[in-house]
Amino acid sequence: MKFGPNVEVMGAPVDPITQRIVPIPGVSEQVEIWVSFVLEGYGVDALGFCKEACQNTRVLVETMVSIFQL
């Protein structure tokens, strides 16, 4: 589905060729590009893996501090 001519989003016209709004005062757009990295051979998201590893390490250290009264 594509926008045709005379379409507006929040008062800003949509360019039917680019399918993006033509900015007007108070209305603009921001394009964000999201990427992810997958650990090859494991199919695991690298950011999720790192976050989980940090959390598990924190739990391990806190447990050892408690057990050994460090």
Image (cartoon, rainbow, N blue to C red):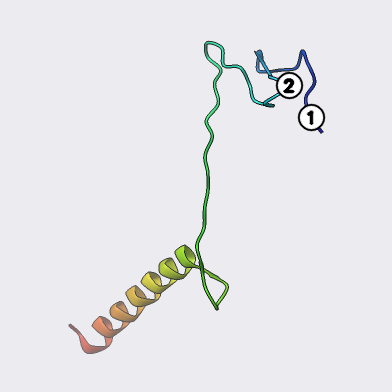
Q: Which mark sits nearer the N-terminus, 1 or 2?
A: 1
What residue occupies the far front of the structure in this picture? 17
Residue for badge 1: 2
What residue occupies the far left of the structure in this picture? 70
Residue 35 coordinates in the image, percent (x, y): 52, 53
User: Closest to the observer: 53 or 61?
Assistant: 53
User: Closest to the observer: 57 or 40?
Assistant: 40
Q: Quadrant of residue 47?
A: bottom left
Three-letter code, disc 2: Pro
Task: Please tell me which residue is depicted at 69% across the width and 26% down the height of the picture.
Answer: 19
Q: Secondary structure at mark 2?
A: loop
Three-letter code, disc 1: Lys
Task: Please tell me which residue is depicted at 52% across the width and 39% down the height of the picture.
Answer: 32
Q: Is residue 64 above or below residue 33?
A: below
Task: Please tell me which residue is depicted at 52% across the width and 73% down the height of the picture.
Answer: 40
On the rendered image, what quadrant is the N terminus found in? top right
In this picture, residue 22 sits left or right of residue 68: right
Q: Secondary structure at mark 1?
A: loop
Residue 25 coordinates in the image, percent (x, y): 52, 10
Residue for badge 2: 16
Q: Is residue 11 above or below residue 70?
A: above
Q: Evaluate if marks 1 and 2 touch, with contact meaning CB atoms under 8 Å apart.
A: yes
- Number of residues whose C-alpha sits closer than 10 Å to that of mark 2, classed few (under 14), some (14–19) or many (20 or more): some
User: Closest to the observer: 5 or 45?
Assistant: 5
On the rendered image, what quadrant is the C terminus found in? bottom left
Residue 17 coordinates in the image, percent (x, y): 71, 23
- Number of residues whose C-alpha sits closer than 10 Å to that of mark 1, classed few (under 14), some (14–19) or many (20 or more): few
Total labels: the figure holds: 2
Q: Marks 1/2: CA distance?
A: 7 Å
